[in-house]
Image (spheres, helix red, strand yellow):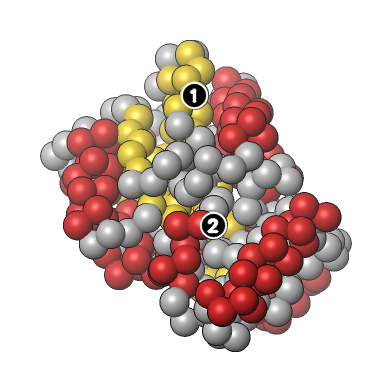
Amino acid sequence: METIIVHCGAGTLRDMGGRKAAVIDSVEAGYAVLERGGSALDAAIQATIILEDSPYSNAGRGSGLNLEGEVEMDASIMTDDLRCGAVACIKNIRNPIIVARYVMEETDHVILAGKGAQRFAKILGIKRYNPITARSKELYNKFLKKVKQGKGTQYFPHLPDYIKHYNADTVGAIAMDCKGRIAVTNSTAGIMLKLPGRVGDTPVFGAGLFADRAGGVSATGHGEGIIRLCLSKVAVDSMKTNTAQQSVSYAIRKAKKHKIRCGLIAIDRRGRIGSAHTVDAMPTAYITKGTLTYKE
Ligand code: GLY
């Protein structure tokens, strides 16, 4: 029954080699946890840490910068017994998913944001880390130059018009363990050049992710659109009577009607995999019955 699926964001064809390597490393690391008898929660977290550490994902190290040139990250976790935890707009940390797990396991809350999330990470003894890389700075300067040339304003009000040029490389993982339990994780720095303080779908339960006994879903792409449709909950509700693939296809048809650039991955209660997107590519890897498959 051990099954795992991960993705490295829905968006353009940029950096496909690096993103492919990241999802394969991630899915293998998560599956190794499941093979040792580990929990779906530990497997999804381990897979997400590998994706956050890849400079080719827009999560953790190498994350995209906001309009003011800073990295603000969101991450979340949910298990099929409705336990959940998330951080939003957290800065100066390497692996936001670890803090999201602590929010779920150690606090009475579901989401901690901004300075409160950073303070919580400090209390936990998590070291400060600057996630900006030379490559993320270079991309930021390139896109900021376009905005300054008149393709947007200081506050970038027409982001939906421009989003097709950017990757929204949120990462996500879903694992099912030998007991049939499901855990879903998400991590992102949001969409490059977002306004400081903006929170996307990634830490919003029902939108960026959802899990219950019917299955688990992780979403990626244009956060504002995904939130409006509560896209992950739509797909999980469908899994009460349909397969994972039928359910993500149904949710993606809805997203297409609203012209939302996004993607979904899923595992249903019988361990079946689903993935679909509305964009050029969504590097995805999964292992089911011991066999690894890579998809774009
Ligand atoms: N899906 C990532 C975001 O919009 O923040």
Any part of residue 107 in sight: no
Dot 1: what SS? strand
Q: Amino acid at mark 1?
A: Tyr
Which residue occupies the foreground of this view, 80 or 141?
A: 141
Residue 134 x %, y %? 83, 55
Contact between labelled residues 2 and 1, with CB atoms less than 8 Å apart: no
Between discs 1 and 2, the one toward the N terminus: 2
Which residue occupies the foreground of this view, 289 or 265?
A: 265
Q: Identify the residue at image location x=64%, y=78%.
A: 148
Q: CA distance from mark 1 to mark 2?
A: 22 Å
Any part of residue 291 in sight: yes
Q: Identify the residue at image location x=37%, y=55%.
A: 261
Residue 3 x %, y %? 45, 26
Which residue occupies the foreground of this view, 183 or 64?
A: 64
Residue 282 x %, y %? 46, 40
| Residue located beneath label 1 in the image | 294
In the image, residue 219 sits, relative to residue 123, either above or below, namely: above
Residue 290 x %, y %? 49, 14
| Residue located beneath label 2 in the image | 166
